[in-house]
Image (tube, rainbow, N blue to C red):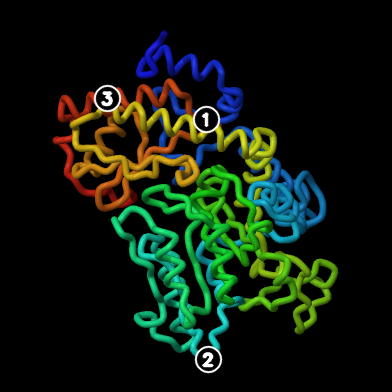
Amino acid sequence: MVSKYTLDYAKRLDEKDILKSFREEFYLKPDTIYMDGNSLGLLSKRAERTLLESLEDWKKYGIDGWTQGNHPWFYMAEKLSKKIAQLVGASHEEVIVTGSTSVNLHQLVATFYKPEGIRTKILADELTFPTDIYALQSQLSIHGYDPQTNLIRVKSRDGRFLDEDDIIEAMTDDIALIILPTVLYRSGQILDMKRLTEEAHKRGIMIGFDGCHSIGAIPHLFSEWGVDFAYWCNYKHLNGGPGAVGGLYVNRKHFGTMPGLAGWFGSRKDKQFDMEHTLTPAESAGAYQIGTPHVLSCAPLIGSLDIFIEAGIENIREKSLKINQYLIDLVEFELENMGFFIGTPREDIRRGGHVSLEHKEAARICKALKENGVIPDFRAPNIIRLAPVALYTSYAEVWKVVQILKNIMLEKKYEKFKNEREVVA
């Protein structure tokens, strides 16, 4: 019997991997192991092709590219939404590809934050990504409220995870809106979205989720769970490219709610070019678009999303769980007594698409990894995030990463670097 801590065992896992053929779809740098797909996904050949096709449309058709060519621009966002809706568990009318994480959050809060009486506060958490906090503080100030008193952040008991009981306890009568992450960006913890939505609605509170670290890595059932709204980026697990256009979801029960930040592209399609000064919003999530689609940033998603549809999000999740568990097992076996702590949930139901290793020398260990051909991700103050991505990371690569990390620690190769982050961590 082959030990699971050997390269031969890892190679056997690769042979059985039903997703292994998708690895050939991506541009992989020779002699480099990419473990940062939870921050920026790699370029696929299909994404490259659909981007070049859209450039060709511009070159060939000029302004007629809005309605002609390989990928007409006027309906591009809606066509992409039909694909991505399958990944978030929604109807295509409830999803639109538009904006960015921060822009979409501003739009959704401007639309659904309606303070009244004692309900003036917004509930978030202290572990969420900073952009969400900045946007919420801004929206509170616009409404004339002090962010210091009206933005409530649920505390973490250990600095890594959130307890759903603590979040529910904070759903008091003065909360008007709740914004939470689907997956915590540092630890990779998945929140129980279904339970939190049910509890919020019992108290008459609207709830929305930031899906940046979950879309493309785990299945979602936003419609079935009754989530009011959600928003996300498409450049991490969905491999849409740097600065790729984001996405948002609005439950159909809210269709007809006027957008808080109205714009021309939120018009009903048949009315958009009537040029009236009264907005006739789309009868779908498309109403919450603000500006013209960023066509050349949408184009790679056309090809990228086809890969996800072919692979199947359930298959992606199954491999993601297995390969991340394999990484955890190797770390515990090979790096014992080297100062590492696995700051990621062990239970499958609570773990997203990456593993967080905590170490007091994390910043310079990351630099040493890069020097040795591994691309990790550092998050302050002491986290090394490693993301074996189901579509293009092999089990053999995971085995090699842990061996490289072990060698770095044994030979103290990290000591030649400063223990501080680069400009871009």
Query: From mark 1 to mark 2, how far is it between C-alphas?
Result: 52 Å
Of marks 3 and 1, which one's residue comes earlier in the chain? 3
Q: Which residue is mark 3?
A: 334
* Disc 3 secondary structure class: helix
Q: How many marks?
A: 3
Quarter of the rendering containing residue 318: top right
Q: Which residue is mark 2?
A: 117
Amino acid under disc 2: Gly
Amino acid under disc 3: Glu
> How would you rate the neighbour count of disc 2 (Cα within 10 Å): few for under 14, some for 14-19, many for 20 or more?
few
Q: Nearer the viewer, residue 280 or 346?
A: 346
Picture layout, residue 258 above or below residue 270: below
Q: Nearer the viewer, residue 8 or 28?
A: 8
Q: Is there a contact, CB below 8 Å, between mark 3 and mark 2?
A: no
Query: From mark 3 to mark 1, how far is it between C-alphas?
Result: 24 Å
> How would you rate the neighbour count of disc 3 (Cα within 10 Å): few for under 14, some for 14-19, many for 20 or more?
some
> How would you rate the neighbour count of disc 1 (Cα within 10 Å): few for under 14, some for 14-19, many for 20 or more?
many
Residue 65 visible at all: yes
Query: From mark 3 to mark 2, how far is it between C-alphas?
Result: 58 Å
Of marks 1 and 2, which one's residue comes earlier in the chain? 2
Of marks 3 and 2, which one's residue comes earlier in the chain? 2
Q: Is there a contact, CB below 8 Å, between mark 1 and mark 2?
A: no
